[in-house]
Structures are given as structure tokens and as C-alpha cells.
Image: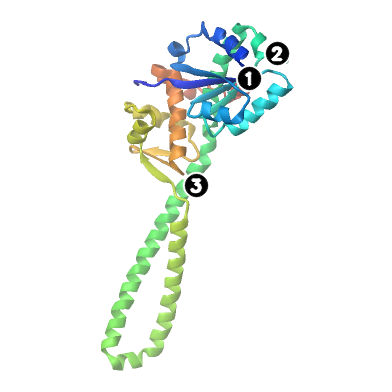
């Protein structure tokens, strides 16, 4: 698959001296060639508002604060307030009790690569949680079909009653003879209509999923043409995300953001494997993929 835009990774540190050391660590790391990733910026700040503006839109944010009590506290604050600004946040695991500016660039370089890999694997490992939402969507679809049929049946009954009412209007004698029966029928009809109205209101107010064209959403999100839908279908069917349904050229999700987030996850997976998608299929088929690697 042709990939036009590399994954945007940004690193946030505490100060300018940390930027200098991280920059030295990046001098001998070929992220673009190995992972189609670009480190677009190293951001020196402890200010939350500045951080929000600086990291907004990044695919992955790496937090590289000092490994001391203030640094850990700042990292936790960043993780909490910046999670809506980026696709994924990963904290770099550096030696305890050290300032970033004094850490060996070799260790920093190794941890940058490891943090990026953890980000991708963590996204894959979380896919299983989406299965429950998918099942609920299937149940909702079945209930909607049942309600649609009931509405059609009641609509047909309503038409019959309208016809009967017209006939009774034209015949005064028949109206008098059947007045008592029709009053009972009218009462039943009103109750049925109230039930239908209530059910219809419930149906309208349900939080239904939105459906999007897969190729169009891919184009709008990544500014590139979707050339191989099979890989996306394969990954989705294997990991069964809870709130995502994909098929026949469409993707359904609770919102456009959920659909876009899922496509970003798939795109990250495809970038890591690139032309080795068949290797991914073999790993999944042989049950070699171990989500517990993410916890190490």
C-alpha cells in the first residue's frame, strides 16, 4: 500500500538542555526508513496550555520528563490532559533518578524506538474490547427490524380502520348499530397508536451508529487513496473491535471520531508491517502474538 504521510511523532521534555540531548540521540536513528515515522518536533515545556497547542494533531506523543518525583508528577499530568489532543500517548521508560539531559543518548535512542513499538502493539492489543459493542450493534439492528415490522403492521391496521370509519360515516344506520363496538375498537386503536408512538419515539432517540464510506473516510483522514481494503477487513475481522463494524465498503461506528480513530490504528499496524501483512496473518494464525508484551 502506498503511504504518503509518515506517522507524526512528537517528544515533550522539560527544558532546552533536554532537547539538546534527545536531538543527539536522534542523530543515528533511522525512523523514517525503518518505520515510516517522523519526529516532527521536540517540545521543551512544563506549561499545560503551551503543550496542548504544540502536540495537537500528533499521531504519537512521547513523554520524556526527568525520572524524579517532579518529573513523574509532570508526566502524569501531561498524560491526563493531553490524551484528547493526540492519537496515542506513551511515556518513555528511562533510568530512575536521572535527568534527561544527563542520560546516555544511546539509552534514549533505544527507548524512543521501544516506546514507538509499544504504542503500536498496545493499539492492537486493545482491539478485543470492541467486540462487545459490535454484538450490541447487531442486537440493536435486530430490534430495529422488529420495530419496523410492527410499525408497518400497525400502519396497515390504521389504514383499514380509516376505511372502515369512512364506510360507517356513509351509513348512519350501520353507525348506530355498531356504535358500541366501534367505541371499543376506537379505544383499542388509540392504545395501539399510543404504543406505536412511544415505540417510534424510543426508536428515534436511540443512539444509533453512523455509517461512512470506507474509501471516502480514508481519503479525507489521510489524504490518500485506499488501495487495499482487504488488509483493513482482515485486521478488523481478526481483532473484532467492540464499537466498529466494517464490510461492503462501509465502516459503522458510534461517531465519526470513533471511525477515524480505528482507521488510524489500522494504518499504524499496516505501516509497521507494510508489505509484510502476510507475516501478520501467520502470527495471528499461529497464535504467536502476545498482548502481555505490552506490559513489559
Q: Earlier in the sequence, mark 2 or mark 1?
A: 1
Residue 169, horizontal then vertical, whole percent: 29, 87
Q: Quadrant of residue 18?
A: top right
Callout 3: few (<14), some (14-19), or many (20+) C-alpha neighbours within 10 Å? few
What whole-number distance in Å separates the C-alpha atoms at marks 2 and 3? 48 Å
Residue 227, horizontal then vertical, whole percent: 31, 26
Looking at the rendered structure, the secondary structure element under dot 1 is: loop
Q: Which residue is mark 2?
A: 98
Q: Are dots 2 and 1 in contact, CB under 8 Å? A: no
Q: Which residue is mark 3?
A: 136
Question: Considering the image in quadrants, where does the N terminus appear?
Answer: top left
In front: mark 2 or mark 3? 2
Q: Is residue 223 visible?
A: yes
Q: Residue at x 44, y 13 (%)?
A: 32
What whole-number distance in Å separates the C-alpha atoms at marks 2 and 1? 13 Å
Q: Earlier in the sequence, mark 1 or mark 3?
A: 1
- Residue 186's place in the image compared with 23, above or below, is below
- Residue 269's place in the image compared with 143, above or below, is above
Looking at the rendered structure, the secondary structure element under dot 2 is: loop
Q: Nearer the viewer, residue 207 or 91?
A: 91
Q: Which residue is mark 1?
A: 14
Q: Which mark is residue 107?
A: none
- Residue 238's place in the image compared with 293, above or below, is below
Q: Are dots 2 and 3 in contact, CB under 8 Å? A: no
Amino acid at each position: 500500500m502506498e503511504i504518503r504521510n509518515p506517522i507524526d511523532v512528537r517528544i515533550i521534555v522539560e527544558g532546552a538542555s533536554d532537547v539538546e540531548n534527545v536531538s543527539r540521540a536522534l542523530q543515528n536513528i533511522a525512523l523514517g526508513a525503518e518505520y515510516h515515522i517522523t519526529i516532527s518536533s521536540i517540545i521543551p515545556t512544563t506549561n499545560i496550555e503551551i503543550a496542548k497547542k504544540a502536540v495537537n494533531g500528533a499521531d504519537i506523543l512521547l513523554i520524556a520528563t526527568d525520572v524524579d518525583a517532579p518529573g513523574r508528577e509532570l508526566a502524569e499530568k501531561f498524560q491526563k490532559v493531553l490524551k484528547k489532543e493526540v492519537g496515542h500517548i506513551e511515556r518513555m521508560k528511562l533510568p530512575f533518578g536521572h535527568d534527561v539531559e544527563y542520560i546516555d543518548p544511546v539509552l534514549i535512542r533505544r527507548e524512543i524506538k521501544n516506546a514507538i513499538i509499544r504504542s503500536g502493539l498496545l493499539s492492537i492489543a486493545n482491539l478485543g474490547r470492541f467486540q462487545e459493542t459490535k454484538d450490541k450493534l447487531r442486537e440493536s439492528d435486530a430490534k430495529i427490524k422488529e420495530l419496523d415490522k410492527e410499525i408497518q403492521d400497525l400502519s396497515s391496521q390504521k389504514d383499514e380502520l380509516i376505511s372502515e370509519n369512512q364506510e360507517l360515516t356513509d351509513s348512519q344506520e350501520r353507525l348506530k348499530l355498531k356504535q358500541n363496538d366501534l367505541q371499543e375498537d376506537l379505544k383499542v386503536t388509540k392504545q395501539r397508536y399510543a404504543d406505536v408512538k412511544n415505540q417510534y419515539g424510543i426508536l428515534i432517540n436511540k443512539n444509533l451508529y453512523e455509517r461512512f464510506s470506507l474509501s471516502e473516510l480514508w481519503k479525507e483522514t489521510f489524504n490518500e487513496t485506499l488501495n487495499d481494503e482487504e488488509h483493513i477487513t482482515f485486521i478488523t475481522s481478526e481483532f473484532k473491535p467492540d464499537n466498529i463494524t466494517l464490510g461492503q465498503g462501509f465502516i459503522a461506528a458510534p461517531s465519526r471520531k470513533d471511525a477515524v480513530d480505528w482507521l488510524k490504528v489500522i494504518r499504524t499496524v499496516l505501516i509497521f508491517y507494510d508489505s509484510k501483512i502476510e507475516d501478520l496473518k501467520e502470527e495471528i494464525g499461529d497464535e504467536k502474538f502476545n498482548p502481555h508484551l505490552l506490559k513489559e
